[in-house]
Amino acid sequence: MGMLKEFKDFAMKGNVVDLAVGVIIGAAFGKIVDSMVNDIIMPVISKVVLKGVSFTDNFVSLDGSSYATYAKAKEAGAAILAWGNFVQIVVNFIIVALVLFLFIKGITSMRKEEPAPVAPAPEMSSTDKLLVEIRDSLKK
């Protein structure tokens, strides 16, 4: 029972629960970014750059055969170099990294910097007190 109690204590710590919430929100955020890249950004880029051909359908068949789409090549089990899919995933990563950068930058700018605590002046020793008195006497 001791090990079960230790595990329960570990799992219920604030950091573990916060991490679990972060992972769940991150997964949902990933789906939003995927949709934004796949449904909004990449179609515009593909229309401008590739004249309407989907980035995902850009691949090189390594077995020399010709396939109409990426899906048909995968269905046939062909060895392919899917460079278009790679480009799409790189764009997805850049967008996620940019959004996280802006999010973290916004949060850090909203935080107030707390002034560093000022340590109290150390108590002077009796020798120091005597030296200060002598110095003050000599000034007079």
Image (cartoon, rainbow, N blue to C red):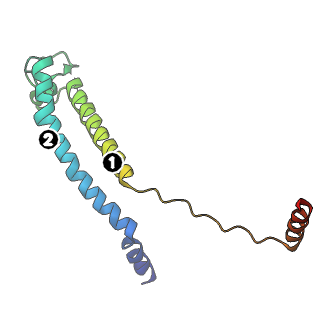
On the picture, is 123 further left or further right than 135? Answer: left
Q: Which image quadrant for residue 3?
A: bottom left
The image shows residue 135 at horizontal and vertical percentages of 89, 62
The image shows residue 124 at horizontal and vertical percentages of 80, 70
Query: Residue drawn at (15%, 39%), measured in percent from left and top?
Result: 36
Q: Secondary structure at mark 2?
A: helix
- Tell me: residue 13, above or below residue 62: below
The answer to the question of whether label 2 and label 1 lie on touching residues, with beta carbons closer than 8 A, is: no
Any part of residue 31 in sight = yes
The image shows residue 112 at horizontal and vertical percentages of 41, 57
Total marks in image? 2
Which residue does the numbered mark 2 point to in the structure image?
35
Query: Residue drawn at (88%, 59%), measured in percent from left and top?
Result: 139
Residue most extreme to the front: 140
The image shows residue 98 at horizontal and vertical percentages of 30, 38
Residue most extreme to the bottom: 1
Which residue does the numbered mark 1 point to in the structure image?
106
Q: Amino acid at mark 2?
A: Ser
* The one of 7 and 77 positioned closer to us in this rendering: 7
10 Å neighbourhood of mark 2: few (<14), some, or many (≥20)?
some
Q: Amino acid at mark 1?
A: Gly
- Tell me: residue 117, above or below residue 40: below
Query: Residue drawn at (31%, 39%), measured in percent from left and top?
Result: 97
Q: Which image quadrant for residue 102?
A: top left
Q: Which image quadrant for residue 60?
A: top left
On the picture, is 41 further left or further right than 108? Answer: left
* The one of 98 and 46 positioned closer to us in this rendering: 98
- How far apart are the two marked residues, 2 and 1, measured between alpha carbons? 24 Å
Task: Give whichever of discs 2 and 1 has the lower sequence position.
Answer: 2
